Image: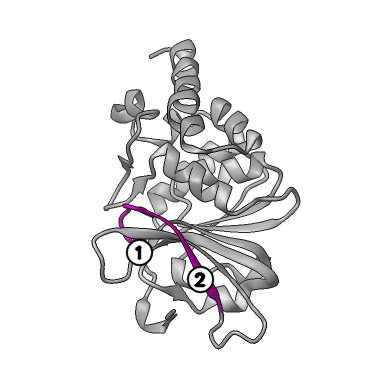
Amino acid sequence: MDATMYAEARNLMVDDQLRPSEITDSRILDTMRHLPRELCVRPDLQNAAYADTSLPLAQGRVLPQPLLTARLVQATNPHAHERVLVVGASTGYTAALFAHLGLHVTALESNSSLAQAGQTFCQTYAPTVVWHQAPLNKGVLDSAPYDLIYFDGCVAALPDFCNDQLSAQGRVVGLLQQNTSLAEAFLAVREAGYSKPFRLTFLFEAQAPLLPDIIPESAFSF
């Protein structure tokens, strides 16, 4: 497809997939109309970049389907100038989306080829994103505390760094898989007097592979 056809595909994605599914944040809709998702997938899959499906990247990783990304980002209730850590940033699409929403973005990726692709994408489309290539289970202490920690994929539990690197009023959003075939989108926040580090709210069911390096044995349970 040429540039005009990709632009048409982005509009169809928004109008046929996102808006009918209660994506109401106009900032997210506008950004996803213009951000070139096709540059975040393998060349042989670019024509499918706006289909209602997740697309394989490398070593079991995927670029989540557009609706899943939109629903999770909307669930974060993002505000301009907040600090966000995107864990498992892969090829940079969600990190760039947050940057276009006005957030200060730190992108963490462990896979070298995905990190390189993400940095290349963001250099053009979201140059304010700061990239770190490192294991995902330690976070990025240098840029903490974060108002938002966003897992761009699925985890079996939250790692310790979420407690250490999240601001007092911050929140954590992602997908959690606990002994079931389907993961569940979650929003985790601190709550005074609560017996555990975070109070968890489940939002909807979804499907995504587990992110690497997130080790359940050293993580919080709910």
Dividing the image into 4 quarters, which one contains the N terminus?
Answer: top left
Toward the right, the furthest residue is: 81
Pick the residue in front: 90 or 55: 55
Is residue 205 in the magenta section? yes
30, above or below 103, in the image: above
CA separation in Å, label 1 and label 2:
22 Å
What range of the chain is rendered magenta?
A: 198-212
Q: Amino acid at mark 1?
A: Pro
Q: Which mark is residue 106?
A: none
Q: Is residue 200 above or below residue 106?
A: below
Q: Secondary structure at mark 2?
A: strand
**Are discs 1 and 2 less than 8 Å apart at CB?**
no
Q: Which amino acid type is shown beneath numbered disc 2?
A: Leu
Q: Which residue is mark 2?
A: 200
Q: What kind of colouring is applied to the model shown?
A: one colour
In the figure, is residue 140 to the left or right of 206? right
User: Does any portion of residue 140 appear in the rendered image?
Assistant: yes
Q: In this figure, which residue is indicated by the disc labeled 1?
A: 212
Measuring from the top left, give residue 150's x and y in whole percent: 53, 58
| Apparent side of residue 200 relative to residue 84 in the rendered image (left or right) | left
Left or right, 172 with reference to 127: left
How dense is the environment of label 1, judged by Cα within 10 Å: few (below 14), some, or many (20 and up)?
some
Q: Position of residue 131 (x, y in %)?
A: 57, 53
Q: Is tag 1's residue or tag 2's residue first in the polypeptide sequence?
A: 2
Provide residue 85's location: percent of width, then percent of height.
59, 59
Left-right relation of 44 to 18? left
Front one among 4 and 134 = 4
**Up-down: is 117 above or below 139?**
above
Q: Position of residue 36 (x, y in %)?
A: 50, 28
Image: 45 above or below 205: above
What residue is rendered at 55% in x and 88% in y?
195
Q: Nearer the viewer, residue 101 or 179?
A: 179
